[in-house]
Image: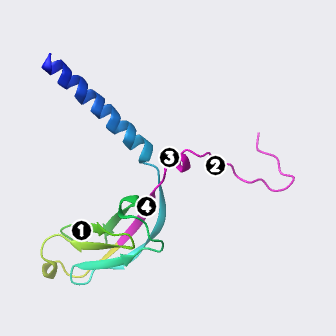
Amino acid sequence: MKNIFKSLLTLLLAAFSFTAFAQTNSIAAVQGGTAHLKNGTCSVTLNEPMAADAYFVAVTPLGASKGLYVTKSGNAFTVKVNGKAETQGDIDFDYVVYRKLPVRQANTTFKPKMAPGAEPAK
């Protein structure tokens, strides 16, 4: 009986987790560019301050690297190299900042504006 209960509870938690993810995975790119790591670190100021849990950052190193990681705050994020900075050198990286959209924004339907007198394609 305990195993059945554990299985059902696990299944319910998995379903709930998937539903929560499915409702919050809509995003919008809000900022991007190229920046430079100097001595293994670089801070990038956001154009528009956001709570640290309201966005995520994707980075791509543009040179040899042993990996990069990101720390976030409300008005900036910092990219650092894994390991000792002095052994990593200075490299450029591309980044894109994505804002997490509320469900009501994510589920809106795009309706293009028509020019006056224009008819939709058939």
Give the crowd class for mark 3: few <14, some 14-19, many >=20 residues within 10 Å: few
| Residue corresponding to mark 1 | 68
Which numbered disc, 3 or 4, marks the residue closer to the eye? 3
Q: Secondary structure at mark 1?
A: strand
| Residue corresponding to mark 3 | 103
- Tell me what residue is drawn at x 52 percent, y 48 percent: 106
* CA–CA distance in space, label 1 to label 4: 18 Å
| Residue corresponding to mark 4 | 98
Q: Amino acid at mark 2?
A: Phe
Compare marks 1 and 4 and give the one earlier in the sequence.
1
Q: Amino acid at mark 3?
A: Val
Give me the disc on residue 110.
Answer: 2
- Tell me what residue is drawn at x 33 percent, y 69 percent: 73
Nearer the observer, 48 or 119: 48
Compare marks 3 and 4 and give the one earlier in the sequence.
4
Q: Position of residue 34 (x, y in %)?
A: 39, 75
Q: Secondary structure at mark 3?
A: helix
Q: Amino acid at mark 1?
A: Leu
Query: Does the magenta run of residues contain 100?
Result: yes
Q: Position of residue 104 (x, y in %)?
A: 54, 47
Nearer the observer, 104 or 85: 104
State left or right for residue 38 relative to residue 46.
left
Which numbered disc, 3 or 2, marks the residue closer to the eye? 3
